[in-house]
Image (cartoon, rainbow, N blue to C red):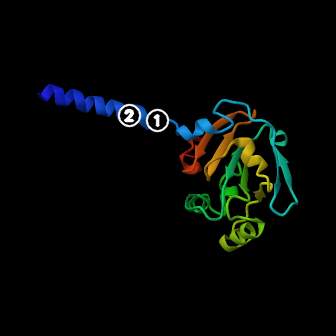
Amino acid sequence: MKKIVKIVLMALVVFSISFSNERDPREQKLTYLIGEKVDNFEITSLDGTKTISLDQLKGKKVFLNFTTTWCPDCIKEKEILGPEYAEKYKDSNVEFIIVFGPYKTDNKEKVEEYMKKNGYTFTPYYDTEGKDLYNQFGVINIPTTFFINEEGILEDVNVETGYKDMEYFK
């Protein structure tokens, strides 16, 4: 009997370890999977003064984060990242593209208010009313973060729990 209990316990341990490293199944529904080349995209800043494309960023790592002003995980993620994140990562060759958009109740005015209220100084980008970038990446849940390497290959992705679980930021 003791031997059976030990075998069952060992099986449970092995089973739990093997599934603890599994990727989030929601990642399979995204347009790009880890290891795939990301198509060029272009996004404009919230104030309309800056447009950036993936092609322009060749040779840099790209942190592409889809976010909102209203979701709890997004708010927590911005608090962790902090208003001074650019200083923290300035020597890391990473371009941060934080994308807000017309996701549910957000609009440009709400994003401007959110940025000001929280003292954020990063450049916020805003998806089009048609959610072009959101759709290009197949985003389903917010926040979703894509980490693209210098060659434009998707290196990591995190759905809904924020960037803090991504290998590069651990």
**Image quadrant assignment for residue 126:** bottom right
Q: Is residue 6 left or right of residue 74?
A: left
Q: Mark 1 highlights which residue?
A: 21
Counting from the top left corner in percent of width and height, residue 35 is at 66, 30
Looking at the image, which residue sits at the far left?
1
Quick one: 81 or 89, which is closer to the camera?
Answer: 81
Q: Which residue is mark 2?
A: 17
In terms of image quadrants, where is residue 67?
bottom right
The residue that appears at 73% across and 60% down in the rendered structure is 122
Above or below 153: residue 89: below
Query: Mark 1 belongs to which amino acid?
Result: Asn
> Can see residue 95?
no
- 143, 104: nearer the viewer: 104
Instruction: Residue at 70%, 36% (x, y): give it.
Output: 149
Which amino acid is tagged 2? Ile
In whole angstroms, how far apart are the C-alphas of marks 2 and 1?
A: 7 Å
Picture layout, residue 56 above or below residue 36: below
